[in-house]
Image (tube, rainbow, N blue to C red):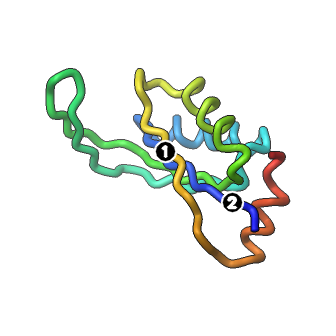
Amino acid sequence: MKHYRSVYATFRDREQAAEIARILVNEGLVACVNVIDKISSIYRWQGEVIEDTETVFFAKTIESSVEAVIARIVQLHSYDIPCVLALPIVGGHPPYLDWIDQSVRG
């Protein structure tokens, strides 16, 4: 079985998340991206605790494309140090996983 990954990332707003999602899908790096708007984030930045509203996305891809996906997100992102994490997908609906394979050019 191929190894699948979900790439989790946060963004300043929905527009930036959707723009980067479209680029990743159009370039064949990911099969799909779910964009979830208006999450609450509490984090430490430059010595202060910040409370902010962000947008998160989950992109579905294959293991061999993860490094390229992360590099592309970082290249396009507006944050100095963007949150970009690759998470393993340990199972799923086989036809959906097949669709990921067919959609990603990895």
Q: Amino acid at mark 2?
A: His
Circle 2 sits in a helix, a strand or a loop, which is it? loop
Q: Amino acid at mark 1?
A: Leu
User: Residue at point 42% right, 45% down?
Assistant: 55
Distance (Cα) linking label 1 and label 2: 16 Å
User: Residue at point 64% right, 75% down?
Assistant: 92
Q: Point out the residue furthest to the front here.
A: 1
Residue 16 placement (x, y as % from top left)? 52, 35
Circle 1 sits in a helix, a strand or a loop, which is it? strand
Mark positioned earlier in the residue sequence (1 or 2)? 2
Q: Nearer the viewer, residue 88 or 40?
A: 88
User: Counting other residues with Cα less than 10 Å from the Cα at mark 2, is it few (<14), some (14-19), or many (20 or more)?
Assistant: some
Residue 22 placement (x, y as % from top left)? 68, 42
As drawn, the label of residue 1 is none
From this view, report whether residue 95 is shown above or below residue 58.
below
Give the side of residue 28 with respect to residue 44, left or right. right
Q: Which residue carries the number 1 mark?
A: 85
From this view, report whether residue 96 is shown above or below residue 69.
below
Q: Which residue carries the number 2 mark?
A: 3
Image quadrant in which you'd find residue 99: bottom right
Q: Quadrant of the N terminus?
A: bottom right
